[in-house]
Amino acid sequence: MSTRPALPSAGYGIRCARPAESAAIAALLARAFADDPVMAWMIPGATDRELRIARYFKLAQGQQRPRAGGVRVAATGDGRLLAAALWSGPGRWESSAVRELAVLPRYARIFGVGGLQRAAGVQNALHEAHPDTPHWYLPSVGTDPGLQGTGVGSALLRQQLAGCDRLGQPAYLESSKVSNIAFYEGLGFRVTGELPLPEGGPTLWPMWRDPVPAAGAHG
C-alpha cells in the first residue's frame, strides 16, 4: 500500500487569500515551519513554539496584505487550505519604519526579549543582503505537512512565477534549509551565496530566479 500523501479527490485551485482566512493560514504555516531552523533559533526551547509561530505569521500577513500580490493560497472548493505563500511585488518588500515600530510590541510578545534580539538580527541580515534589482520577493511559503510532496506547493508558486515570466520580472527568496534548495531549483531559482545569521545562527541560502522568456520571444 502506498504511503505517498494524497491530494483531495475534488482537486484544488490557486487564489488570493480572504481576510477571514488569516488565522487558518497562520496555523497552516506554523505547522509547515515547526521544524524550521531559523524559527527554532529565534524561539528556542519553547513548549508553545508552534503557537508563537502562528502568531508571527498572522502578523506577517498583516504586513503583506497592503502589498501587491500579498497572500496566495492553494485551497479546495469547500475552503480547505492546502498551502500558502506570502509575496511582495517589486519595490514593496520592505515595511516602513512607522509600520515596523507600530507592531514592535506584538513581536516582543511572540519572541520574548532574547528572541526579539535574534529576530532583529535576522531582519537586519536579510535587509543588508537583499538585492537592489526590482523583483518579486517570497519571504515565506508552506504546505500542510500532510500534503508535502504532492506538488501543491510547487503549483502554488508556479502561478506567480508564470506571472513574473510574462512581465519579465525576476524573483528572490532565502531558503532556510539546504534540503529545500533542489525544490526551488526545480522552479528555476539558483543559489547566489550563503548568508550565516549573526550570533551563531543558522545559515540561509539566497536564491534568485530570472524570468523565463516565452517560447519564440526575441530580445
Image: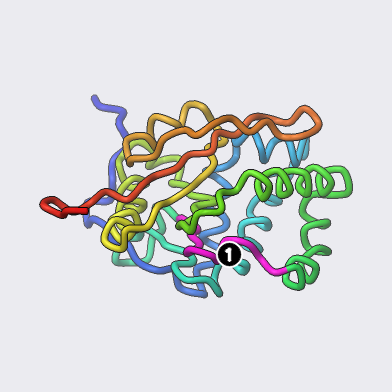
Q: Residue 212, percent across and down?
A: 27, 48
Q: In this view, does 203 lie to the left or right of 3?
A: right
Q: Is residue 7 magenta?
A: no
150 lies above or below 124: above
Q: Is the magenta stretch mostly helix, strand or loop?
A: loop
| Residue farthest toward the right in the current orientation of the protein | 113
Q: What stretch is highlighted in magenta?
A: 85-96
Say which amino acid is labelled 1: Gln
The residue lying at 77 percent from left, 44 percent from top is 121
Label 1: element kind: helix
Q: Is residue 174 left or right of residue 98?
A: left
| Residue farthest toward the left in the current orientation of the protein | 216
62 lies above or below 143: below
| Residue farthest toward the front in the current orientation of the protein | 219
Q: Does the magenta stretch include residue 86?
A: yes
Q: Please name the residue that numbered disc 1 is placed on.
A: 61
The residue lying at 45 percent from left, 46 percent from top is 144
Q: Which of 163 and 128 is in front in this view?
A: 128
Residue 93 sits in which quadrant? bottom right
Q: Residue 49, percent across and down?
A: 71, 43
Q: Residue 48, percent across and down?
A: 73, 45
123 lies above or below 2: below
The residue lying at 77 percent from left, 27 percent from top is 200
Q: How crowded is mark 1: few (under 14 residues within 10 Å), some or many (20 or more)?
A: many
The residue lying at 78 percent from left, 63 percent from top is 106
The colour style of the image is rainbow
Q: Please state, as top left, top right, bottom left or bottom right, where the N terminus lies in the image.
A: top left
Q: Residue 130, percent across and down?
A: 60, 48
